[in-house]
Image (cartoon, grey):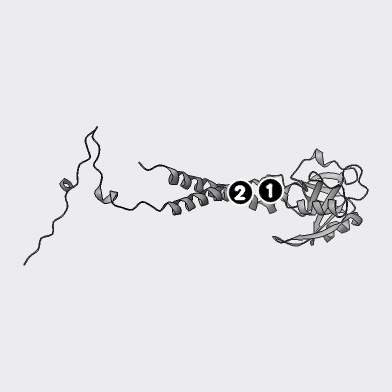
């Protein structure tokens, strides 16, 4: 016995309602269960927390982004005993001739930044102190008495130097504050090129999550 397959034609699809008339509710759609509210709330919380965290991390990298955009030619600060870092400004690539004062020096390390770092004040300094940070590969800079790197403050760099500043102030009674100058030897602007890329990625994550959150909270029509 032969069977016939019937194909749906355009005539079988109901036409949209005329202007001014309310469309009839689809009984199949009406019978579907409502989406779980608990899951929707959890998703909304996550989409709210992630942009806040991403924007916070991006804000902590402002100094790094500025230094990555700084000129690659170093500016000379001259003799460390009389140098005026304020004349150059924050997050600049500079050179400084100085002798270390090991009496006020401290060695520290950070979990995410491998290696040990030596921080010492400039000897014979007149006025506000200037500190220099030298890493393990800075032996040549110590021997020739000239340091080249990033000019920042203990409160700058996203707070990564704040801990050693608090130790110098609290334990060694050094006159170190958040606005005390710090020269990070060996830190060049090119080594900070990761900062603009990571900051851009964090901003993209924040914007995409805010877009998803807006779509989630938009009332259904």
How packed mark 1 is, by other alpha carbons closer than 10 Å (few <14, some 14-19, many 20 or more), is: many
**Which residue is labeled 2 in the image?**
199
Q: Residue furthest top?
A: 20
Q: Where's the C terminus, which quadrant?
A: top left
Where is residue 164? Give x, y as percent.
Answer: 79, 54
Q: In which quadrant of the rendered view does residue 217 lie? A: top left
Secondary structure beneath label 1: helix
Q: Residue furthest right?
A: 124
Q: Is residue 107 visible?
A: yes
As displayed, is residue 45 above or below residue 110?
above
As displayed, is residue 129 above or below residue 17?
below
Where is residue 86? Give x, y as percent.
Answer: 81, 39
How packed mark 2 is, by other alpha carbons closer than 10 Å (few <14, some 14-19, many 20 or more), is: many
Labels 1 & 2 near each other (Cβ < 8 A): yes
Task: From the viewer's side, name the closer residue of 98 and 108.
Answer: 108
Task: From the viewer's side, name the closer residue of 180 and 98.
Answer: 180
Instruction: Tell me, for residue 64, which label it has, or none.
Output: 1
Where is residue 2? Give x, y as percent.
Answer: 7, 65
């Amino acid at each position: 016995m032969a069977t016939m397959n019937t194909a749906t034609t355009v005539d079988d699809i109901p036409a949209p309602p005329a202007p001014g008339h309310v469309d009839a509710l689809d009984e199949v759609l009406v019978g579907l269960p409502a989406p779980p509210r608990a899951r929707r709330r959890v998703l909304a919380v996550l989409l709210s927390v992630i942009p806040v965290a991403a924007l916070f991390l991006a804000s902590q990298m402002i100094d790094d982004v500025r230094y990555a955009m700084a000129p690659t030619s170093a500016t000379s600060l001259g003799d460390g005993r009389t140098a005026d870092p304020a004349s150059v400004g924050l997050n600049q690539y500079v050179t400084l001739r100085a002798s270390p004062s090991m009496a006020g020096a401290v060695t520290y390390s950070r979990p995410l930044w491998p290696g040990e770092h030596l921080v010492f004040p400039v000897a014979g300094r007149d006025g506000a102190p200037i500190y220099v940070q030298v890493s393990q590969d800075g032996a040549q800079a110590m021997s020739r008495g000239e340091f080249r790197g990033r000019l920042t403050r203990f409160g700058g760099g996203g707070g990564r130097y704040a801990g050693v500043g608090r130790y110098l102030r609290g334990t060694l009674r050094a006159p170190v504050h958040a606005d005390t100058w710090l020269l990070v030897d060996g830190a060049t602007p090119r080594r900070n090129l990761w900062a603009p890329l990571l900051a851009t990625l964090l901003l993209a994550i924040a914007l995409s999550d805010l877009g998803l959150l807006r779509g989630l909270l938009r009332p259904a029509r």
